[in-house]
Amino acid sequence: MYDIKSWRHVFKLDPAKEISDEDLDKICMSHTDAIMIGGTDNVTEDNVLNLMSRVRRYPLPLTLEISNIESTMPGFDFYFVPTVLNSNDTEFHNGMLHRALKEYGHMINFDEFIFEGYIVMNPDSKVSQHTQANTKLDVDDVIAYSQMANAFYRLPVLYLEYSGTFGDLDIIKAAKSELTETQLFYGGGIDSLERAQQVSEIADTIIVGNIIYDDIKKAIKTTKIKERT
Ligand code: 1GP
């Protein structure tokens, strides 16, 4: 089984976006540690299955970040289940999860599931609007969420999500400072090796998304982060 604690770099592929075989090959043959499939809009059974079967040819850990029950299917190594800590809608805390367990709980291998606390930071992102997140957060708010994830919910992963914009390094440091057990994922606006390096010196794992579709060469360069000393 793969050890997610060792992951430093993950490419996140959006099933609703087109990617050529050539670009997908570059992504899957790069130095990334894992591929995550996930998105906010138009995530369907068809497009997840299609992307999964294309990525499955490569010997890389493959994970699904669940956005809805309909597009969740067997065949992944892990399933990340988000709980959005700063959402104003209980659906995104545990409502969807409750419905899913009621229907499928009897057939789930729980070892494959990782509960992932989200802090959504960019008010202009689709995920923020979709989950009705309260993004007006200062350093103390983020510290409190981080303590909640680490010491109270004891979540394996906390995901600081700036999707579409590059985050504030002081906020990322604050989130990390409270984590003794929980692994910090950071995603948002990583579009160069320099940014990848800056964040990977703070967060445990960086997630690179949009730049894959905007500039494949730059995306690949983000995998060249230095080994942790
Ligand atoms: C999105 O955190 C990921 O869920 C990555 O963000 O698309 O801005 O790289 P970007």
Image: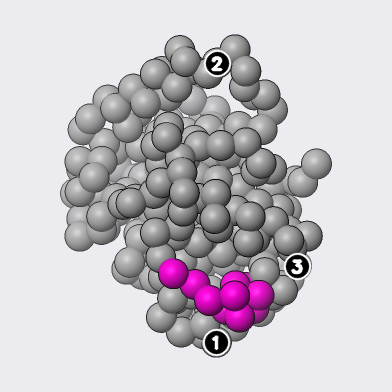
The three-letter code of the residue at mark 1 reads Lys
Determine whether the beta carbon of the residue marked 2 sits less than 8 angstroms from the nearest atom of ligand 1.
Answer: no
Left or right position of 189 against 137: right
Is 21 one of the magenta-colored residues? yes
Mark 2 or mark 3, earlier in chain: 2
Q: CA distance from mark 2 to mark 1?
A: 42 Å
Residue 194 appearing in the image: no
Left or right position of 80 against 40: right
Q: Nearer the viewer, residue 210 or 20?
A: 20
Tell me residue 187's x, y (percent): 45, 60
Tell me residue 180's x, y (percent): 60, 40
For image coordinates 44% across by 60% down, the residue present is 14
Mark 2 or mark 1, earlier in chain: 2
Foreground: disc 2 or disc 3: 2
The three-letter code of the residue at mark 3 reads Thr
> What crowding class fits label 1: few (fewer than 14 Cα within 10 Å), some (14-19), or many (20 or more)?
some
Magenta stretch bounds: 18-27
Is 111 one of the magenta-colored residues? no
Name above or below for residue 97 compared with residue 70. above
> What crowding class fits label 2: few (fewer than 14 Cα within 10 Å), some (14-19), or many (20 or more)?
few
Quarter-wise, where is residue 147 in the image? top left
Q: CA distance from mark 1 to mark 3?
A: 26 Å
Q: Which mark is residue 105?
A: 2
The three-letter code of the residue at mark 2 reads Gly
Kind of element beneath mark 3: loop
Tell me residue 121's x, y (percent): 30, 53
Q: Which mark is residue 229?
A: 3
For image coordinates 43% across by 32% down, the residue present is 69
Mark 1 or mark 3, earlier in chain: 1
> Which residue lies under the disc numbered 1?
217
For image coordinates 26% across by 41% down, the residue present is 131
Q: Quadrant of the N terminus?
A: top right
